[in-house]
Image: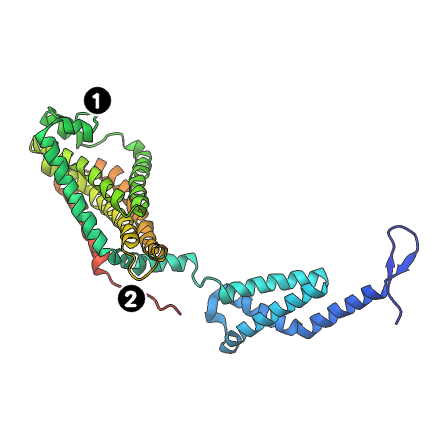
Amino acid sequence: MKAPVISSWFGRGQVEASPDIESAALRSDRFRLEREGEWKRLEAILARMEKGGLRRIADEDLIALPALYRTAASSLSVARETSLDAATLAYLEALVQRAWFQVYGPRQGFVRWLREFVFGGWSRAVRSLWLDTCIALFVMVAGTVVGWLLVAQDEAWFYRLFPAGMMDARQPGASREQLLETLGHDAGAAGLAGFAAQLFSNNSAVCILAFALGFAFGIPSLLLLVHNMALLGVLLWLYNGQGLVAELAAWLSVHGTTELFGIMLSGAAGLHIGRAMAFPGKLPVLDAAAAAGRRAAVVMVGVVIMMIVAAILEAYPRQLVEDTSARFMIGGTMLVFWLAYFYLYRRAAPESGA
């Protein structure tokens, strides 16, 4: 057989291809022809899976998928070792990569993960932290009481715990009218969107800090909860002096039932990690902390959502709704919603093979 001729870039004549090049081309063609049917079948199965998932795949194709993937991977290995043509090598690399993702890659897309998170995953994670949540709730109530008692015994504690500015009416000696004005309607509604963004940033920072400090056996997380709730105790004492506790509670409830719930869950998540490190049980400390961290992380993803909701409630309904009863209704509705979602709504966890 006569060797093919190749045009020369450096002269007018033609040169014949070497026998080695001809032999390599024949090996590449033979290699492709022998296996191309299986590659094409695998490619067709992958195309259907990428368009519509497993519902578009016949049972026999689904059963054959692992074997076809192994065949393509073996072909890729041979192609690399024998230096077959670049086109075949590139095709096999792309095919094997797509097949690996379908066989061994994650089974959930973002939409499916979000659906599972909202409809069961988040509430299950919160319920798994029930002991830590109870501890965090107790600490928050204790912090509120401590703040009230401290400032009731010595007003100087007000300025230590709640550093009010010179123009802030919320300080000892303020009249009833001045305090009521701080709970009133804000006419500057045009800037409420920016106000909501600022509130979300501040609230999220507190929550993330409470969670992040959990590595120190949860103690800093609890101290942070005490400090933040002492501020609430100081405000309750101040407004109680003018008989405005109900008005303050209504004003706070609009966003507070969501915000304080989220802060409590953040402290519980940090405490959960700290307890796992202090009392790992039969697991090594790092393994126990990692398992607790995965559960707590799911809770914290949901806390971010709660902080967004709290910021919107704080910027809009709290500023625009003045009636005390209406404010209590909004806050109470949110509290009932969160309690029902976390502790009454129960959906079984999906099976691992689903």
Residue at numbered disc 1: 167
Q: Residue furthest top?
A: 166
- Where is residue 27? Give x, y as percent: 75, 70
Quarter of the picture containing the C terminus is: bottom left
Position of residue 68 relative to residue 139, above or below, is below
Query: Residue at the bottom extreme?
Result: 60
Name which quarter of the figure residue 177 lies in: top left
Q: In this view, does 327 lie to the left or right of 203?
A: left
Q: How far apart are marks 2 and 1 (CA)?
A: 54 Å
Kindly indicate whether the residue at mark 1 contacts the one at mark 2 (C-beta within 8 angstroms): no
Mark found first going from the N terminus, 2 or 1? 1
Q: Is residue 89 left or right of residue 168?
A: right
Residue 43 lies left or right of residue 207; in this view the side is: right
Vertical placement of 58 versus 53: above or below? Answer: below
Disc 1 marks a residue whose amino acid type is Met
Which residue does the numbered mark 2 point to in the structure image?
348
Q: Nearer the viewer, residue 191 or 80?
A: 80
The x and y percentages for residue 16 are 89, 62
